[in-house]
Structure formats: C-alpha cells, structure tokens
Image (spheres, rainbow, N blue to C red):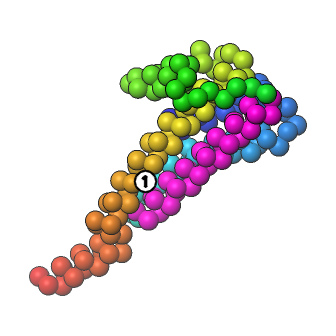
Amino acid sequence: MSEIVYDATVVFCGRFINKYSRTIDQMVQAARSGRQNIAEGSMASGISKETEIKLTGVARASQEELLLDYQDYLRQHGLELWDKDDERAAVIRSIGSQPDRSYKSYMACFEGPPEAFANAVICLIHQTNYLLDQQLRQLEKQFVKEGGLRERMYKARLNERQK
C-alpha cells in the first residue's frame, strides 16, 4: 500500500504542484520515507525487534506528514476533503480489499481532477496507517512476550552453559 501511495504522490506532485515549489520535495520524501522505512524495518526484523518497531514508527509518522500535506493542498485550493463515510471514499476502500492490488488498480481514481486524486491518496494513506498501527501493536506484543535480540541471545547462552 505504501508503494502505491509513493507512486501516486510522485504523479500528483508532477501534475498539480508548481515544479519550483519545495512542497514537491517534501511530499515525495515523506511518501518515500514511509515506503522505505517499512521495507528497512522488515529487513531488520530478524535481528532487532526494537529497530523494526522504531522504523515502522518512522514510516507511520512519515505517512501522517504526507496526509497533512494532502489535506493542506485541498484546504489551500478550496477543495473538498471527503468524509470517511463518503461514497467515493468507500469505492477507494473497496479497491483496497481486492487481492493483488497495485497502482494500476487505482488508475481511474488518479486520472481525475486534483480534488478526486488527493482524496483518493488520502484514503490510501488512512488504509496504510491502519495497517501500520496494527503492525506496531503486534510488534510491541511480540517484543514484550519474547524480548529483544540481546535478551534472546543471553537466554540461549545460559541454556548452552547449563547443558
């Protein structure tokens, strides 16, 4: 989902934001940070739950920053921010429940005017944040139950010594 948000943000910025605006860099970097930190946290999972939790939290914060940028864009341009119960938002959510979704799955949502495009990405960011929140809760439970790498290594070393 974060990859779709990133790709959509690059396209949105290219279409609707002045190419000389710093906003482009800010939005693209926030979207990229969300995507990259999820991947990096996942790669670190086998070594350090603490690092995975931290990087997943950074990804979540980056998505929140991007969400605010899209909301600012709508407000500053006098465009409507869809309510979560809006029928148009429900359409975006329904695409998200399909298997093997990709950027192409949302193409029709991204081809319209800036209001529809921004709101579609906002829906995707909310979905991404929901998934990240669930992941963070699970990681924290796992960390509390199993401990970190150092704790597991210490237990393994003690078990080995006791043999």
Badge 1 crowding class, 10 Å Cα cut-off, few under 14, some 14 to 19, many 20 or more, is some
Where is residue 141? Give x, y as percent: 33, 60
Can the viewer see residue 100? no
Read off the residue under disc 1. 136
Residue found farthest to the right: 20
Q: Is any part of residue 134 visible from this angle?
A: yes
Q: Which residue is farthest left? A: 163
Label 1 sits on a secondary structure element that is: helix
Give the main secondary structure of the magenta stretch: helix
Please state the horizontal and vertical placement of residue 109, each as a whole percent of the image.
Answer: 60, 18
Which quadrant of the rendered structure holds the C terminus?
Answer: bottom left
The vertical placement of 26 against 49, above or below, is above
Q: Does 89 appear above or below 145?
A: above
Q: Which residues are magenta?
A: 49-77
- Taking the image as shown, residue 15 lies to the left or right of residue 19, namely left
Q: Is residue 24 left or right of residue 4?
A: right
Q: Position of residue 57 (x, y in %)?
A: 52, 55
- Is residue 51 magenta-colored? yes
Is residue 80 found left or right of 144 in the rendered image? right
Task: Identify the residue at horizontal 54%, vertical 50% (top origin).
Answer: 60
Residue 36 in the image: above or below residue 78: below
Magenta span includes 159: no
